[in-house]
Image (tube, rainbow, N blue to C red):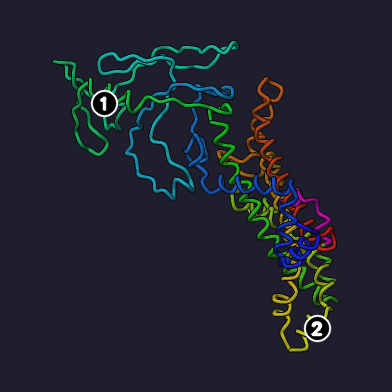
Amino acid sequence: MSLQETTTTQNTLTPAQKTRRRFLRNKPAVFGLIVIGLSLIVFVLGPLMTPDSTPNANNQMLAASLVPPGFSTEILNIQLNREAKKTSFISKVVTGTPSFVRQEPYNSYSFEGADIVLIPFEGLREDGSRIDGSPTRYALADVLYPLAGAAKVDSATMQSVTFTHVDGSTMTKSVTEMREAVEAQSLSSRSYALGSDKFGRDVLSRLIIGVRISLLVGLIAVVISLTIGVFMGAVAGYFGGKTDDAIMLLINTVWSIPTLLLVFAIVLVLGKGFWQIFTAVGLTMWVEVARIVRGQVISLREVQFVEAARGLGFNHLRIIGRHILPNIVGPVMVIAAANFATAILIEAGLSYLGFGIQPPGASWGTMLKEYYNYVTSGKPYLAFFPAAAIMLMVLAFNLVGNGLRDALDVRGKSS
């Protein structure tokens, strides 16, 4: 394509198309966008993607605590003595699937009459070999069904078992039938791709659930900061005078308070909790938005199209909302991306200090707090995984913010 044809093509592009083209040519920004896109998929699907689909990925199996990445073990799923309730698809996506079984890891098993006998798994030796526990016996009926009482074996034949289900019904099953059912339904395996923590919880599952916390705190913080910051900055920049002086005094006062101290103060007032933390983070980030919006509005309030709107008798709200704010979307988008990254860091810091998401919530900051001691005890990967996740997410939003800044800079290089 000749230079003239290229120039003609460029001239036919809309400003939005030119901005998109400049952004897509920025490879670091595209990488950040891909990371954010994948994180959004994880955010939406959540527990459907985790090896441990229980709420907060909090299924604890103490015998398998602190196992290394890649470890797997056979498990026996024993029914809890309460009736399992059906979980809707929406509930599975939003909160996870409650567990109605108790999982027992084992090295080997055998059947004896109406019982199954396990050689439990009780950890790993330094050389990686498995430790055998004392043989443990479980009634087959107790493994397969939620019972209202003890099962009774037919003393005459020893080939059938009678028991009462928690729903009140009485059932009789043959021993052979129950053995086959146990092998088909109750024996399974469990793998730990990234290892387990001291409670035997799957680290990978908790990392995946932590994506939700980070994206949600970023989203809520950005919405709150934009709502307050755009309003305050627009009012200050448009009206000026004493209104501007009063708002700038408030902005500078809030700006002078260290962010973490301000968050601590807000948390003490609102209390510790899921939504309180998100609100506290958002209430500390609006000042930077307000300063940028104020500067942009000051530069636009005297331009011809705003003066024309005043001459036509439009009210102040319409002039600000329909004529000024649409022209400062670019800088607001850039600061929103930066605030998203900052909110993730603040939430992680709060959780690490014990003021953020409380256990058993799967926050990356909480995971760092629980795992940092293992850095010097031979298992540094436990702290590395959440730290790397925080770093990657913050980097992604910063790269996207930088890409937006360059793409929206019409005074920069021509695309």
* In front: label 1 or label 2: 2
Which residue carries the number 2 mark? 307
Three-letter code for the amino acid on which mark 2 is drawn: Glu
Crowdedness of circle 1 by 10 Å Cα count: few (<14), some, many (20+)?
few
The image position of residue 245, as x and y in percent, is 85, 71
Quarter-of-image position of residue 394: top right
- Residue placed at 34% from the left, 17% from the top? 137
Three-letter code for the amino acid on which mark 1 is drawn: Ala
Asked whether disc 1 touches disc 2, contact meaning CB atoms under 8 Å apart, the reply is no
Which residue carries the number 1 mark? 150
Q: Which mark is residue 274?
A: none
Where disc 1 sits, the SS reads loop
Residue sitting at the far front: 2
Which corner quadrant holds the C terminus? Answer: bottom right
The secondary structure that most of the magenta stretch takes on is: helix
Quarter-of-image position of residue 209: top right
Which corner quadrant holds the N terminus? Answer: bottom right
Please tell me whether residue 5 is drawn above or below residue 242 in the rendered image.
Answer: above
Quarter-of-image position of residue 42: top right
The verdict on residue 346 being magenta is: no
| Magenta segment | 252-264
Residue sitting at the far bottom: 312
Res 264 seen here:
no
The image position of residue 342, as x and y in percent, is 73, 49
